[in-house]
Amino acid sequence: MHSKIKNSNLVFRKLKISDYYQFQKLFLMCFSKKVSFDFYKWRYFSSGISCCYGVFKSSKLIANVGLVEIKLNNKKKEKIFSRHSSMVLEKYRGIGIFSDLLKKVKKKISTKVRLIAMWPNKKNFASFGISKKNIIKKKYYLYKNSTNLSQSKEIQNLNINKLIEFKKFIINTDNLFYKNFLYFKKRYLYYRKNDYFINQFEFKKFTSFFILKRNIDNNGKNFVILEHFGAKEIYLNHLSYLIKNQNKLVFLSKKRINKSNCKLVDSINFHIGIIKNLNLKNKNIVNTREIYLGDTDIFITS
């Protein structure tokens, strides 16, 4: 049954903070995971334009898309949206309701932004009705290492509060998204900051930093590289050091890796949808800049 038949009984609207319990129920039914009120409030109500849009049937939330405000790393530092928490109740999938929601949302946001970042998974490639020619697609690879623990060194990590002391190093110019100290502060110090820590590495006159997260999955504890700042000149030296010495390290790669101590865990799709008026120069920025696992919600504890 097509969604147009059902739409007379549906309400499409922006979620309010009081809709948390409906959001929580839908999240649990779609992902088999609980989501806290603190996460809901932090992710979608802590900035001026971050938000969720949903579809309600008889006051029950049956579909949702979250939009997180972020800035593009160009001269204007223009605001764009990153799409998260895309979910539809199982009985309403495949009948066009989610596509209709995205089209309505695109119409609302097209006056505010020109671009939208998307992280499609294997089950959801819906793209706000944006034509394929206006979507820039990139694929990344997620790896986990294994080390010889008898030969590895003890890794010294720093408390995430050290970010304040290291703020002068947060000057990266190669990120796709604009990340100053305020970005890092909001991302890593405002919500569950005890999940994160900093690894510092020095070589010659350069200093490099990774932000890591302690993560628990079905195979136990591992360590996820979420972010880099500091000297890009020694980024690969720093990464190689961690791969050699930190067991069960999860990291993102632009290319496939052929090393016996690195196992391919998954692939990650990243799309940039062009809503309007994007010139060739800006397209090149999208293709040449870096993204990190911290840009996604994959490893956020909700």
Image: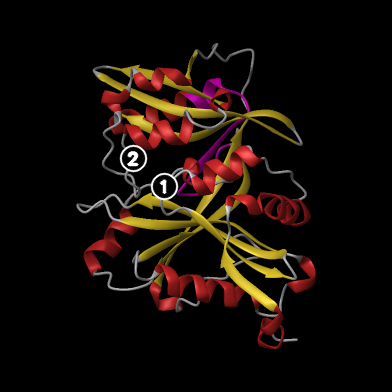
Q: Amino acid at mark 1?
A: Ile
Asked if residue 258 is among those painted magenta in the image, a careful observer would answer: yes
The quarter of the picture where residue 14 lies is bottom right
Q: Which residue is mark 1?
A: 291
Q: Which residue is mark 2?
A: 179
Q: Amino acid at mark 2?
A: Lys
Mark 2 and mark 1 in contact (Cβ < 8 Å)? no
Residue 296 in view, yes or no: no
Is 213 situated left or right of 61 in this image? left
Q: Going from the N terminus, do you reach mark 1 or mark 2 first?
A: 2
User: In the figure, 259 relative to 129: above or below?
Assistant: above
- Quadrant for the C terminus, please: top right
- Quadrant for the N terminus, please: bottom right
Q: Position of residue 200 (x, y in %)?
A: 40, 19
Q: Nearer the viewer, residue 231 or 227?
A: 227
Residue projecting furthest to the left: 75
Q: Position of residue 72 (x, y in %)?
A: 32, 52
The answer for how far apart the CA atoms under marks 1 and 2 are is 11 Å
User: In the figure, 211 relative to 79: above or below?
Assistant: above
Look at 61% across and 38% down and name the residue there: 38
Which marked residue is nearer to the observer: mark 1 or mark 2? Answer: 2
Residues drawn in magenta: 242-259
User: In the figure, 73 relative to 15: above or below?
Assistant: above
The quarter of the picture where residue 22 lies is bottom right
Residue 40 in view, yes or no: yes
Element class at badge 2: loop
The quarter of the picture where residue 273 lies is bottom left
Look at 43% across and 46% down and name the residue there: 47
Q: Nearer the viewer, residue 144 or 137?
A: 137
Asked if residue 99 is among those painted magenta in the image, a careful observer would answer: no
Q: Nearer the viewer, residue 239 or 83?
A: 83
